[in-house]
């Protein structure tokens, strides 16, 4: 079989032995014999979800029926779950609402932010931003008469220096979804505000993986999905954060009845509810929303600073394994080695990333890839071990060394 | 105890004995001892849902994890479920997509329809339309530079005669959500088209309760929820129908990545997918969507013409019970007696509708009310019996006769 470099083995064993978060893995139902490194795409099933969802379906829906809107708290769920997520992103209660998809929430956030900066013609976004963020920026800008400028975070300061009073909104993500690079949220938000613009953040690849400080940084709007590091299940409802100071003047484009001041009053015209409730739209998918609520209990009594520390230990160890085992075989690490610039996944470059991902899957190591040539290894401090990362690196080394993979390029199939 | 008018008893017994759809009630898990007449607000739990959802959670999410997007058909679910709903609304495959809320789908339908009729300044909607339809009509019209005209269906012909070339879109529902009145979809759609305008229908209170014929009528766009007569569970995903002929020029306002021609290609710009797939937005709430898919199996081998016939038999019988037992006590039927003008619920007017609804609930008869004075009795031919309606009428008679209810008006709480 494979020869194991003893130093890496020992380092993994020591790090896992020292891991204070180790017992949290019991909060997940992870399949036997699988190394799951794709929680940055779809978080695994928390143990709390199945019994919670069974209760929601059989008792709340089946027995209590329509009365559950009041009696089992369905009506308040978007705000209740929103506040629970708020605790993970540094948002005081009353500023976060859960529901709809990230794309819909982003449409609301961008539309509302632009409306707060009339007479400014530019919307700045990242050329490397996740596709839906870029597409929606274009759609919202066109609809509201703005132009999009694609400026990488590293170029923002000089762009703002040249165009500051023309920029309405800056829309970025703290973590690059391909490379795993972490940007400086504080510096970007501050530069944006100095230019008189508003900051809209997409937290999909950050929330749940590290402490975030929306209130403290003075962020204006943020959105994020429920299904990556929040482990809420496939397509789990997303969330929208809007800072308190914007609520009074917040104009949402999707004036659904759930966001009305008197949703059951059947008023002639739309009057927005007070506070973040005005960002509600239609009736949310309650079963998916309750699954997310159950999933969020994995964060009970968890210190996100410890989560971040372990996440960095994991990605640092994987980069170390890469240097030792994989770089000599032509696999190039893409994620920055500087911990201050690293999110919670590691991207490795290889021209046959698709075939390698498939071959790893056949050996029980689940990672994903981003075309054309990046393999992504997502770590989650709540359940990933250093030992698992070494196992993954060993398998990848063996696969490359033995050329035991299909060199065909990726088909355009669904991988999220 | 109460005296039972024998003729009504016998008529109920005979109608239930003759009911060919009677065995379908076994497809639902209805709580013992409850007469559920609020399926027009939240359909009850189909027996197929719990095992289907357990599989979705524990095997598909828990064990297969990210691989389920391909392996268990999650990616195709919006189009697959859309086509299943299409069979219930008279839509050939490839024109219906499921996901998001009715409000979001309506925003898309109205925006897209208006864009297909540039230079026409009016959007016509029903002053009695469900609130979210009215609010979104105003929001979309304002955003696209149109004006809303609120014209009841009965006044449409004369309005179009006066304004025909100025009307871009007519947005109605076939069933009035308060009174249960059924409008003539064919006549409204034809008049709309004669004026060169497009027809957008909200099917929330009709789909699943009667045959619908979107293709045959030449309807342009339609939306509807999944949680009323489709029984998909609380906040079940909604759906959008767009006729084939509009797909090529269909511009959606929410250009999320799921609707891209190459959703995994990470193109620089948004290129809409071919066909109805371009109306996809973000990642849909898969657990809620799969619950809806399971729920739709209650329609397997069911003839909607039979459903409609039994629904009319039920509402006709309830109106008859009302005349016999309730009108003498001051309860006034609001729903038209003409079967051609009757949806699948009956509305009764009484100044203490709220207290009566509560008192009925205490006796195991679940109905709802719409402020200020309407009680709504929803029937669903898949599980409602004539005997249940007589039981409900008897209870209501006794409650009114004994003044056994709270005369306070309705609080502004959540009832959907």
Image (tube, coloured by chain):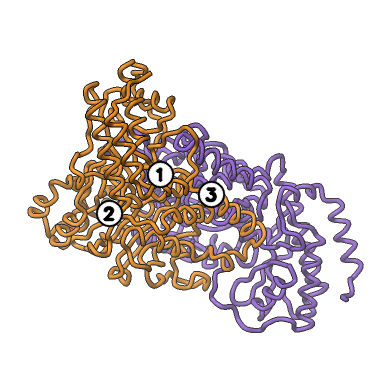
Chain colours: A orange, B purple
Residue A52 percent across, percent down from the top left: 56, 54
Q: Which mark is residue A152?
A: none
Vertical side of B125 occupied by B88: above or below: above
Assess disc 3: are there few (<14), some (14-19) or many (≥20) residues with their C-alpha within 10 Å of its C-alpha: many
Residue B140 sits in which quadrant? bottom left
Assess disc 1: are there few (<14), some (14-19) or many (≥20) residues with their C-alpha within 10 Å of its C-alpha: some
Left or right, B122 with respect to B23, comes to left
- Helix, strand or loop at mark 1: loop
Which quadrant: the C terminus of chain A?
top left
* Residue where numbered disc 3 is placed: B288
- Helix, strand or loop at mark 3: helix
Which quadrant: the N terminus of chain A?
top left
Q: Kindly identify the residue that appears in the image at 17 percent across and 58 percent down.
A: A192
Vertical side of A291 occupied by A315: above or below: above
Image mark 2: chain: A
Residue A165 percent across, percent down from the top left: 12, 60
**Sequence order check, earlier mark of 1 and 2:** 2
Q: Is residue A142 visible?
A: yes
Front residue of this view, candidates A332 and A227 = A332
- Helix, strand or loop at mark 2: strand
Residue B83 sits in which quadrant? top right
Vertical side of B395 occupied by B30: above or below: above
Q: Could you tell me how far apart the alpha carbons at marks 1 and 2 are, in whole angstroms?
A: 27 Å
Q: Could you tell me how far apart the alpha carbons at marks 2 and 3 are, in whole angstroms?
A: 27 Å
* Residue where numbered disc 2 is placed: A201
Left or right, B151 with respect to A240, comes to right
* Residue where numbered disc 1 is placed: A383
Vertical side of A190 occupied by B255: above or below: above
Q: Is residue B343 visible?
A: no
């Amino acid at each position: 079989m494979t020869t194991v470099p003893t130093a890496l083995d020992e380092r993994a064993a020591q790090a896992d032995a020292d891991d204070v978060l180790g017992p949290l893995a019991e909060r997940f139902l992870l399949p036997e014999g699988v190394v799951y490194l794709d929680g940055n795409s779809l978080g695994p099933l928390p143990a709390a979800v199945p019994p919670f969802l069974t209760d929601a379906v059989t008792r709340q829906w089946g027995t209590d029926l329509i009365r559950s809107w009041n009696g089992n708290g369905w009506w308040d769920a978007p705000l209740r779950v929103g506040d629970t997520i708020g605790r993970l992103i540094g948002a005081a209660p009353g500023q976060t609402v859960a529901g709809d998809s990230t794309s819909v929430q982003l449409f609301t956030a961008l539309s509302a932010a632009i409306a707060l900066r009339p007479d400014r013609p530019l919307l700045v976004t990242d050329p490397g931003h996740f596709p839906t963020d870029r597409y929606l920026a274009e759609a919202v800008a066109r609809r509201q008469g703005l132009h999009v400028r694609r400026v990488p975070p590293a170029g923002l300061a000089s762009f703002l220096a040249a165009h500051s009073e023309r920029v309405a909104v800056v829309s970025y993500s703290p973590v690059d979804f391909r490379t795993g690079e972490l940007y400086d949220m504080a510096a970007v938000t501050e530069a944006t505000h100095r230019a008189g613009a508003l900051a809209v953040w997409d937290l999909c690849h950050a929330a749940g993986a590290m402490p975030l400080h929306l209130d403290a940084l003075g962020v204006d709007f943020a959105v994020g999905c429920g299904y990556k590091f929040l482990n809420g299940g496939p397509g789990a409802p997303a969330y929208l954060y809007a800072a308190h100071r914007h609520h009074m003047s917040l104009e949402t484009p999707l004036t659904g009845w759930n966001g009305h001041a008197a949703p059951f009053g059947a008023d002639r015209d739309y009057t927005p509810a007070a506070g973040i409730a005005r960002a509600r739209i239609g009736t949310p998918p309650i079963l998916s929303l309750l699954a997310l609520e159950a999933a969020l209990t994995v964060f009970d009594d968890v210190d996100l600073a410890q989560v971040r520390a372990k996440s960095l230990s994991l990605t640092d160890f994987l980069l170390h394994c890469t240097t030792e085992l994989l770089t000599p075989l032509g696999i190039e690490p893409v994620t920055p080695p500087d911990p201050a610039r690293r999110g919670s996944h590691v991207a490795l470059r290889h021209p046959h990333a698709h075939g390698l991902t498939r071959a790893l899957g056949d050996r029980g190591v689940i990672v994903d890839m981003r075309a054309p040539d990046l393999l992504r290894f997502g770590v989650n401090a709540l359940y990933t071990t250093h030992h698992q990362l070494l196992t993954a690196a060993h398998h990848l080394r063996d696969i490359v060394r033995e050329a035991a993979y299909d060199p065909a390029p990726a088909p355009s199939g669904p991988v999220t």
